[in-house]
Image: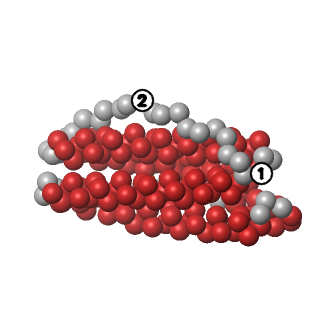
Amino acid sequence: MLNLKVEASINDQINAELYSAYLYLSMSAYLETENLPGFASWMRVQFQEEQAHAMKFFDFVNERGGKVILDAIEAPKTEWGSVVEVFEHTLDHERMVTERINTMMDIALEERDYATESFLRWYIDEQVEEEAAAEAILSQVERLDGHGNGMIMMDRELGARVFTPIAE
Ligand code: OFO
């Protein structure tokens, strides 16, 4: 049986992961309008990843005998001033998500819910990757400053990313 406080924190995070998905899909739409199909495709993979993060929580709640409660998803921002701004926002967003996962871990430990603690470790590790990926792209686009062949090459490189489902 899932502890009620833990269950509420997971339901809240399902909404946050779906918001992340929505935000990255919105960034993908913006990048399409900037004629950067590779960047847009990278963000679309990010959208798929966030949906998978939400579903991993969804399945866990059901597995533990809890109840998933879905709430309204906030509308994401739709315009950014530049590609640099998109990745600054991505990095800030992922840092905020890391904080949220850390708070969930605190709740699981306070409630002595060790199964959830063990489950959350996957997300703790995932956030290290999420922040590192956003940081790496941000530093590259900052250096390129939106111009030149470098952006074309980077667009091609990011366009090669494919979605990999979470291994069970
Ligand atoms: Fe779900 O990790 Fe990004 O937000």
> Which sits in the foreground, 145 or 6?
145
Label 1 packing within 10 angstroms: few (<14), some (14-19), many (20+): many
Amino acid type, mark 2: Ala
Q: In screen coordinates, is 107 left or right of 71? A: left
Q: Choose the circle earlier in sequence order: 1 or 2.
A: 1
**In this picture, is 5 found above or below 164?**
above
Quarter holding the C terminus? Answer: bottom left
Q: Which residue is drawn at 24% across and 35% down?
A: 67
User: Which numbered disc covers residue 72?
Assistant: 2
Question: What is the crowding at mark 2: few (fewer than 14 residues within 10 Å), some, or many (at least 20)?
Answer: few
Q: What residue type is labelled 1?
A: Leu
Judging by the rendered image, the residue that carries numbered circle 1 is: 36
Q: Which of 164 and 100 is in front in this view?
A: 100
Q: Nearer the viewer, residue 93 or 130?
A: 93
Is residue 123 positioned above or below 20 on the image? below
Which quadrant is the N terminus positioned in?
top left
Numbered disc total = 2
